[in-house]
Amino acid sequence: MHVRIATLDDAPALARVIVDTGRAAHRGQVPDEVLLKPDLPEAYAESERNWHRSLQEIADGGNPQARIVVAEDDTGVVVGLAMGGPPKQELLPNSGEVYVLYVRQDQQGRGHGRRLVQAVAEHLAQAGMSALLIGCLATNTPSRRFYEAIGGRVVAEREFDHDGILLPEVVYGWENMPVP
């Protein structure tokens, strides 16, 4: 297993991981009409465009505090990803936030998630942030258990706008950045 900074060439793999994992993980948590829209080929294409834009913005220096990292299996296949940067809302003093964390379901329980969080946290700490926030759907019990297992505590509740549908989200926080 290897964690590294994502490159522009990773956009297609990021799209596959997030679309496939998101659709599987959020089944029953997000209404199907939202979760399964658009159809799979368009979902991959749209996600790839979005990841390419985010990666390009970081590469161009337009978002210097942001970081996208990937986890690869032993064969070099991208099996997980995380993105973080300044917080959407400063719920803890001097905090950064992990905006996205996905690991393919067949790769969960192998330490990828923990290492991805640590890699983003390390970058945010180097950028001067000392606390960390991660939001997840309130109904996402597996993710909530994971965040609690790595030391997070609920610091807030908010709503997440998923294509016009507001979904309850809980925000986990670490007052001290969880770096290795």
Image (cartoon, rainbow, N blue to C red):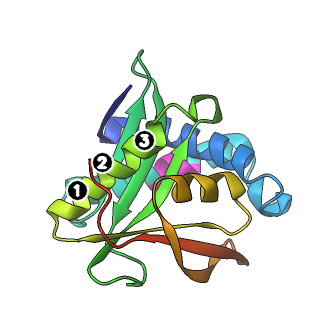
Task: Say which label, 2 or 3, has the lower sequence index.
Answer: 3
Which residue position holds label 3? 11
> x, y (%) of residue 81?
45, 44
Disc 2/disc 3 C-alpha distance (Å):
19 Å
| Magenta highlight range | 46-50
Disc 1/disc 2 C-alpha distance (Å):
6 Å
Residue at 38% across, 39% down: 70
Residue flagged by tag 1: what amino acid is it? His
Task: Say which label, 3 or 1, has the lower sequence index.
Answer: 3
| Res. 171 in view | yes
Residue flagged by tag 2: what amino acid is it? Ala
Residue 57 among magenta residues: no
Q: Nearer the viewer, residue 97 or 164?
A: 97
Disc 3/disc 1 C-alpha distance (Å):
20 Å
At mark 2, the secondary structure is helix
Which residue position holds label 2? 119
